[in-house]
Image (cartoon, grey):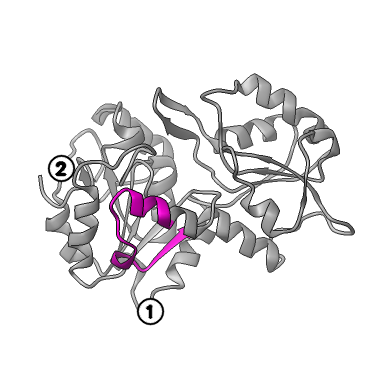
């Protein structure tokens, strides 16, 4: 389904067509501060069908952190099978050698994220540094672009980019929800690092590794029988189409200020289609 005609479906009406569900969290279940009305109840109702539900999220933090956050927003841990985070997937890819990091001594890592988030650096036993001049690796796991200008990020990252220091972005989202509106996300900061001359490896939606990590939890379910629900065309919908699953776009999160014409233009730009439009993650209107 594409173009400017958007038939709004009810979640309860389409749930029976699929055998498993990959749900985004930010912009779908909550906005980072509060849950969207009816979202937790929708997950509970979906769980009652006995079909596997996985949260697949662009978060540099571990599953346990995100599970606790979901619980705060009313989503019970027993209602879903697993929480797959881009941060955890990145660690697995480094540990199995898919992503190479500097070797020979303890890696000095500069982490750019929200306060207190050094998940990948700590798991890899890196030495934390604050100065890009001393870094062997940059991890871009989150953004504070609502408080820190992109020019400041460029100045901070520039010395590492000039030295060819590799970067791993564990949250490819280009936009993030903040109390004051949308702001550049970690993915935008990672793109800026690339513009400065640095090389970035992205882990998370829309890239395939996070979907395959989630799919490993399912048995004998065809990808076309999985419905991915998200609020980002560039990440959730593009990623789901590349994975081969069905796609539902909620009109909350980063879609809250959009309209049918803008979404149609984005679909043409990205070359994807949407199977279902949902006004929000609510079982029924």
Q: Is residue 19 magenta?
A: no
Compare marks 2 and 1 and give the one earlier in the sequence: 2
Query: Would you identify the image quadrant in which residue 169 lies?
Result: top right
Q: Nearer the viewer, residue 256 or 249?
A: 256
Residue 98 visible: no
Residue 109 visible: yes
Q: Nearer the viewer, residue 146 or 99?
A: 146
Residue 42 image offset from top left, x and y in percent: 20, 54
- Total marks drawn? 2
Extreme residue toward the right, this view:
104
**Residue at disc 2, secondary structure:** loop
Q: Disc 1 marks which residue?
A: 219
The circle drawn on residue 8 is: 2
Residue 142 image offset from top left, x and y in percent: 56, 39
Query: Would you identify the image quadrant in which residue 44 lies?
Result: bottom left
The residue located at (38%, 43%) in the rendering is 26
The residue located at (31%, 39%) in the rendering is 34
The circle drawn on residue 283 is: none
Q: In the rendered view, would you say 68 is above or below 33? A: below
């Amino acid at each position: 389904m594409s173009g400017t005609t958007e038939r709004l479906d009810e979640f309860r009406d389409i749930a029976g067509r699929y055998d498993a569900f990959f749900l985004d969290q930010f912009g779908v279940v909550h906005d980072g501060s509060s849950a969207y009305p009816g979202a937790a109840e929708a997950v509970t109702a979906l769980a009652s069908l006995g079909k596997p539900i996985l949260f697949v999220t662009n978060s540099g933090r571990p599953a346990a952190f995100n599970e606790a956050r979901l619980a705060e927003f009313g989503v019970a841990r027993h209602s879903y099978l697993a929480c797959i985070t881009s941060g955890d997937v990145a660690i697995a890819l480094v540990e199995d050698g898919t992503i190479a990091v500097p070797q020979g001594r303890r890696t000095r890592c500069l982490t750019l994220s929200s306060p207190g988030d050094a998940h990948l650096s700590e798991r890899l036993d890196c030495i934390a540094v604050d100065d890009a001049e001393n870094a062997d690796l940059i991890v871009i796991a989150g953004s504070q672009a609502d408080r820190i200008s992109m020019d400041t990020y460029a100045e901070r990252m520039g010395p590492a980019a000039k030295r060819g220091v590799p970067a791993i972005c564990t949250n490819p989202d280009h936009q993030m929800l903040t109390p004051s509106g949308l702001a550049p996300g970690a993915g935008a900061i990672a793109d800026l690092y690339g513009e400065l001359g640095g090389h970035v490896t992205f882990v998370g939606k829309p890239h395939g590794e996070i979907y395959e990590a989630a799919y490993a939890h399912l048995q004998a379910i065809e990808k076309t029988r999985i419905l991915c629900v998200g609020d980002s065309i560039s990440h959730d919908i593009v990623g789901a189409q590349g994975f081969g699953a069905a796609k539902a776009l909620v009109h909350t999160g980063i879609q809250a200020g959009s309209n049918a014409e803008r979404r149609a233009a984005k679909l043409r730009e990205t070359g994807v289609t949407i199977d279902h439009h949902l006004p929000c993650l609510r079982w029924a209107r």
